[in-house]
Amino acid sequence: MALTTVSNAGLGGSIDLTAKVTGTLPIANGGTNSTSTTYCDLTANVTGLMPDSNLAAPGKIGQCIQVFKSDVTSTTSTSFVAITGITLAITPSATSSKILIIPDLYVSTTADTVGDAQLFRDTTIIGGDDENDVFQMSGGANSWRSTRFHCNFIDSPSTTSATTYLVKWLIPSGTIYLNRAGEGDNVSGSSTFTLMEILA
């Protein structure tokens, strides 16, 4: 006759679960219904970023980087050229990520001139892509004009490779300055360029 039960008295002590029990311990008896003894050590055996589908939080900031510029630069170019120092590279953690681009630039133009700007991802125009869709940076009428150029733009680079963002500007006539308040002034302002990765 097969033995199916053992009385408490018959145990005469305790059962060593680590050495004397094999097979699967049912969930109802405190087990997991699994015979596996190998587990993932999240503190030692996992590297990199957790994918969005595996508990990453959509809509949250993955990373944020910024460049600060306080020296004066200028251009008289009538075609779009990169603003010196207003460029950043970011490596998205997922192809579904969005990049929030925030230029906050202190710009000045000479009298009766209007400066325009474009946003670029590497060599691709992503904002202000034609003559009727440029960002106006500053405009003056019979006097020197200083203002802040600020905008928010969301891009979908669809890559996990390092991606460079920059701002280009032009002036149809005269001169446009960065971080200069007026004629005769030297350094008198500051500018920032910020990139944020938004997890999608």
Image (cartoon, rainbow, N blue to C red):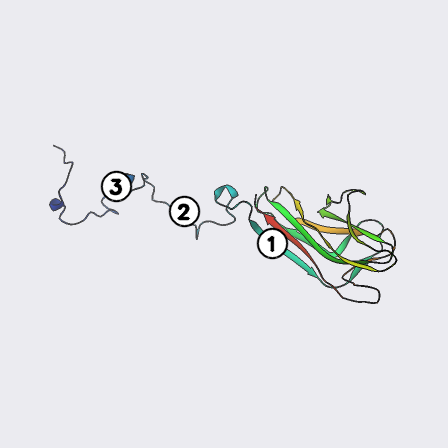
- Residue 44, position as x, y percentages in the image: 44, 52
- Which residue is depicted at the point 66% across and 52% down? 89
Sequence-wise first label, 1 or 2 = 2
Mark 3 in CB contact with mark 2 (< 8 angstroms): no
Sequence-wise first label, 3 or 2 = 3
- Which residue is depicted at the point 77% across and 58% down? 147
Please give the label number shown on residue 45. none
Q: Which residue is mark 3?
A: 29
Mark 1 in CB contact with mark 3 (< 8 angstroms): no
Please give the label number shown on residue 40. 2
Sequence-wise first label, 1 or 3 = 3
Q: In the image, what residue type sits under mark 3?
A: Asn
Mark 1 in CB contact with mark 2 (< 8 angstroms): no
- Which residue is depicted at the point 25% across and 41% down? 29
In the displayed structure image, the side of residue 77 where residue 25 appears, left or right: left
Within 10 Å of the Cα at label 2, are there few (<14), some (14-19), or many (20+) other Cα atoms? Answer: few
Cα–Cα span, label 1 and label 3 = 48 Å
- Residue 196, position as x, y percentages in the image: 62, 51
Within 10 Å of the Cα at label 3, are there few (<14), some (14-19), or many (20+) other Cα atoms? Answer: few
Q: Which residue is mark 1?
A: 64
| Foreground residue among 108 and 47 | 108
Q: In the image, what residue type sits under mark 1?
A: Cys
Q: Describe the element under mark 1 as helix, strand or loop.
A: strand
Residue 66 makes an appearance in the image: yes
